[in-house]
Image: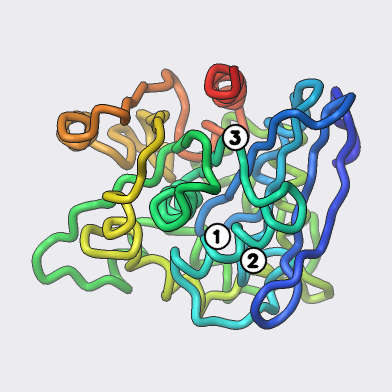
Amino acid sequence: MDGALMGTYTTHDVPVRGGLLRVGRWQGEGPVRRVVLAVHGITATHVSWELVGRAVPPGTMILAPDLRGRGRSGSLPGPSGMSQHATDCLAVLTELADGRCDVAAGHSMGGFVVATLAGEHPEAVGRLLLVDGGVPFPLPPGADLPALMQAALGPAVERLSVDFASHEEYQAFWRQHPAFSAEWNDAVAAYVDYDLGSGPPYRSTVAGELITQDYPQMFVGGETDRAWPGIVTDALLLRAPRGLMNEPGGLYPPELLDAWAATRPRFVWREVPDVNHYTLVLGRGADVVNAALGELLA
């Protein structure tokens, strides 16, 4: 984690409702002129931004929280939801960045968090970078949300109730995940190691009960959907053509994003070739994310 190519990595604890929110901070050399808020996905932690943090340019600070119920913020209580996460992120910006970021970037569910932040607190966000998340999904008629979550997240949510004997066993579990089996690297290893609590036995630090509160908010009619009319800034979405299990098609059909853009002139989207939902930030796609951040910060 401390092997940043430029600048430094530190952690900070920010007071929020119910306790302290852990925040990872990557800071480039020289005085801070630009601030990026980087928010992780539904069962992830701030370490998912490791490859982005390593490339932090001079004069830039990246603030990446462990969301409520995840990582070193795992003991923070509910209720959860996108508005609560946005409130927590606003506390991070107030404590560490004068209340505002130049770019709010969110991967997966993190995209919904930063979109909600931008809609509810437009003064706090310069521009949005949505990394395969943030546009509400249509909810199928009569959908069983717990079953839908189980099917959509697969091993990522199944692991939350499983005990592991060692870090090595947990690494082996993730190495066979279809998203990582062909693209394992040291950033993924750091992400996996950070996820575990104390042990043995070891278990993920992610609080499953808060996951079930957050998941419904990513659909049409949820908190993010209601926040979108308040977004007054530029938003760029990067789409992965393969999904969480490395399956073709990805999370977002292109026609859904085209329809979203048709009524929102400040929203655009691009496809990132040859990545899945995870490797868009934890693999080869990180270079594209870094380039997009540079573009939005320019």
User: Does residue 48 appear left or right of residue 153 in this picture?
Assistant: right
| Picture disc at residue 289 | none
Query: Which of 233 and 208 lies nearest the eye of the viewer?
Result: 233
Amino acid carrying mark 1 in the image: Thr
Identify the residue position indicated by label 1 in the image: 43
- Residue occupying image coordinates x 75% and y 58%: 95
Q: Distance from label 1 to label 3 (Cα)?
A: 26 Å
Give x and y (percent) for residue 281.
58, 34
User: Does residue 118 appear left or right of residue 202 in this picture?
Assistant: left
Q: Distance from label 1 to label 2 (Cα)?
A: 7 Å
Amino acid carrying mark 2 in the image: Arg
Give x and y (percent) for residue 59.
79, 25
Q: Residues within 10 Å of mark 1 (few under 14, many from 20)?
A: many
Q: Quadrant of the N terminus?
A: top right
Query: Which of 173 and 154 lies nearest the eye of the viewer?
Result: 154
- Residue occupying image coordinates x 27% and y 60%: 226
Give x and y (percent) for residue 181.
58, 37
Query: Which of 249 and 270 lies nearest the eye of the viewer?
Result: 270
* Residue contact at pointers 1 and 2, CB within 8 angstroms: yes
Give x and y (percent) for residue 83.
45, 66
* Residue contact at pointers 1 and 3, CB within 8 angstroms: no
Identify the residue position indicated by label 3 in the image: 102
Q: Distance from label 3 to label 2 (Cα)?
A: 25 Å
- Residue occupying image coordinates x 45% and y 48%: 122
- Residue occupying image coordinates x 88% and y 29%: 7
Disc 3 on helix, strand or loop? strand
Identify the residue position indicated by label 2 in the image: 70
Q: Earlier in the sequence, mark 1 or mark 3?
A: 1
